Amino acid sequence: MAELKGNANNLNAHASGISPVPGAMTVMGAGPKTPLYKVFSQFLEAKPVFTNRDAMSISFTPNNIPHRDRQVEELGRVLAPVLKGGKPSNVFIYGKTGTGKTLVAKYVTGELEKVAGGKLKVVYVNCKMKHTADTEYRLLAQLAKEFGKNVPFTGLPTDMIYRAVFEAIDSVPQNIILIVDEIDSLIQKAGDEVLYTLTRINGDLKRSRLSIIGITNDLGFIDRLDPRVRSSLSEEEMVFPPYNAVQLQDILKERLTLAAGKESVSEGVIEKCAALAAQEHGDARRALDLMRVSGELAERAGESQIALRHVDAAQEKIDQDRVIEITKAQPKQSQAILYSIIQLSEKDKSVETGDVVGVYNRLCNEHGLKPLTQRRVSDLIAELDMFGMIQTRVISKGRYGRTRIIELALSDALREKARQLLKDVFY
DNA sequence: AGTCCACAGGAAGGGCAGGCGA
DNA sequence: TCGCCTGCCCTTCCTGTGGACT
């Protein structure tokens, strides 16, 4: 869109088939009378809410991280030995979602990289990213790739991948800091053997040194680790507390100065975004999302200032987008299970596994879908719970057995949206 | 106190697809 | 082409659970 040079006049030129900017995007068919022309013109003529939209993004790393000075310093001190060629301790960072763990780890290692020059290499992997580093093989393949060795995404024996990673790491004398984000996902799927090997790799390396920063939001995760892995991985431990509403306000103000001016929000908007995010365990990510989406909604309405009503609409939109995205992304079997739960919960607020299996089997028969076993359905129900689409709890009904009580975790409007979406899939 | 129910959930393994090297 | 390796999805088998019932 940048190629349009922010000038509505360009649209006229494009519409007439003349491209005033070499290599500019051609708005084919968007002639002055088309509705699309009006949309584009309004967009280009409107004063934007965010002049630097990137600064509102979650992946943006600012130069200043409010209310995390202590953590930045602490991590800096732990990693500083790298500057004298020593191996820093492995660090384990806990904290709920949106408490700045990843941001601080990236910021500190980034600054360290600048000072250390070529002597330090920082590698970041996120184990929650599907098909990236969520299994032992994929983590190793990802590491090999980071060090310039391309390995196939499947097919090789694990020991061969280990050898490839090992050789790649030790090919040049260097200190390596490996940031393993959402490390609990990796361990859940692959076991802790991979961590055991990585934490002991230094014994075999001749020229390089590897330190690990493990990040998780699962506070009980470390207790489930093999004691050998636990002791070597958590040589240093850091806990990131949730932000409170006032701290979230500071974060939003800081980002707003980078992304736009203070005049782009009306009174109470920052406070509202912060308060809503504080309700969700002090999640700065949520606060930024709310502010960013509010700004986008304001821009779309042709307004240059975010108002409180935009925040309300943004909250609704974020929830709706999440539900739609999750519902669409599910495999057909999970969609059938979710549809069964929705149908049942229209009659009863809470339903049981047995009821769901019954409706699900009927749905499968109607649509020529091969029904899964109850065991598998039980796993898929647990997955839907994990996605936040439903809430479940296991109860005992005494003589009448044990079961899982399932409740939809969606508002009426969202349930209707999901129901309509799934209806289109099955009918 | 023992039995029973209706599951939950762990473990093991089958089948399939993708990819490699010989 | 074949044997081997991987991840992934799934089934089968099994044990565990906890409160009502006898």
Image (cartoon, coloured by chain):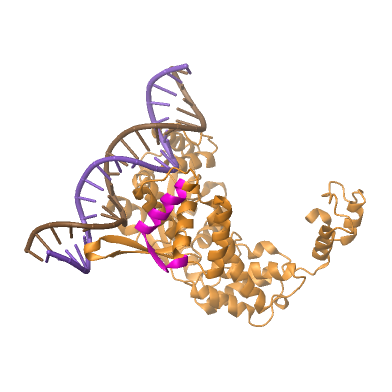
Chain colours: A orange, B brown, C purple
Q: Where is residue A215 in the image (x, y as percent from the top left)?
A: 44, 57
- The reply, left or right, for residue A413 in relation to residue A92 is right
Question: In this view of the protein, can residue A384 be seen by the observer?
Answer: yes
* Residue positioned 49% across, 75% down in the render: A279
Residue A309 is one of the magenta-drawn residues: no
> Percent position (x, y) of residue A28?
84, 49
Q: Where is residue A172 in the image (x, y as percent from the top left)?
A: 50, 38
Q: Residue at x 83, y 66 (%)?
A: A45
A407 vs A312: above or below: above
* Type of secondary structure dominating the magenta stretch: helix
User: Viewed as shown, does residue A21 lie left or right of A173?
Assistant: right
Asked which quadrant contains residue A9, the reply is bottom right
| Range drawn in magenta | A346-365
Residue A82 to residue A295: above or below: above
Q: Where is residue C3 in the image (x, y as percent from the top left)?
A: 38, 21
Q: Is residue A151 above or below residue A300?
A: above
Q: Residue furthest bottom?
A: A267
The N terminus of chain A sits in image quarter: bottom right
